[in-house]
Image: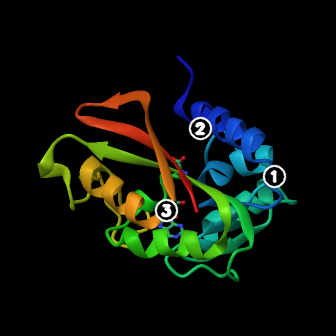
Amino acid sequence: MPHIHEDYLTAVQDLARRYQPKRILKTDCWNEADGDTPIANVIGAECVEIDSDCVQRAQSKFPGLVATVGDIRVMPYENKIFDMLVDLSTIDHMFDYQVALDEYVRVTKDGGVVYIVVWISADPCDYDREDGSHFDPTGKYRQYYFSEEKFLGSLNRTFKSVIHGVFHHFKGVRTLHWFECVV
Ligand SMILES: C[S@@+](CC[C@H](N)C(=O)[O-])C[C@H]1O[C@@H](n2cnc3c(N)ncnc32)[C@H](O)[C@@H]1O
């Protein structure tokens, strides 16, 4: 069974083949700094990441990587400049995710694609609370588990179209879901 980050890479490469994007933004650079699959490098994306140490680690490993310190809720970019935006479990590190979704629409061109992966839980006790194993007082690494109905409802209200699927990777009642959204 392939590692989940390799699954992410395969999915994103397929997306890039279909949409032929010129400019790609990937949110967070954890995969490039600390992970084993430097997705942004492979697909030629630039990154926005809230943790400046993480940006530094990624750039020292990959000197050519364009990575900007910034918050996905207040993105340091002009309107409508990206053809593709990839969020591989960044947005599920925050409560107020609608603010980030609105930013994704603002920075992505009309007709462009936003690909989002989040943890969904079937257990209502999981919603709106952090997982203690990921507890971080700064909030940067705090993991949230979303309700499928609520998150999909937000996506459907925000994007022109949404295709939704599930990665075969399970953690109890928690499942990783992917969403291919057209702006
Ligand atoms: C623990 S990692 C996991 C995500 C990773 N892409 C993966 O594939 O598993 C979460 C990353 O999101 C970053 N992050 C959290 N909140 C953010 C925000 N508001 N804006 C940008 N990056 C954020 C964290 O600093 C961290 O690098």
Identify residue for label 1: 44
Q: Which residue is mark 2?
A: 8
> Cβ(mark 2) to ligand 1 < 8 Å?
yes
Mark carried by residue 100:
none
Number of the label disc, if any, that sits on residue 159: 3
Q: CA distance from mark 3 to mark 1?
A: 24 Å
Residue closest to the far top: 1
Marks 3 & 2, CB-CB < 8 Å contact: no
**Pick the front one: 142 or 178:** 178
Amino acid residing under circle 3:
Phe
Q: Which residue sits at x=64%, y=74%? A: 107
Mark 2, secondary structure of its residue: helix
Q: Secondary structure at mark 1?
A: loop
- Residue positioned 66% across, 54% down in the render: 33
x, y percent for residue 170? 34, 29
Residue 50 visible in the picture: no
The structure residue drawn at horizontal position 23% and vertical position 34%, both measured from the top left corner, is 173
Q: Which amino acid type is marked by label 2?
A: Tyr
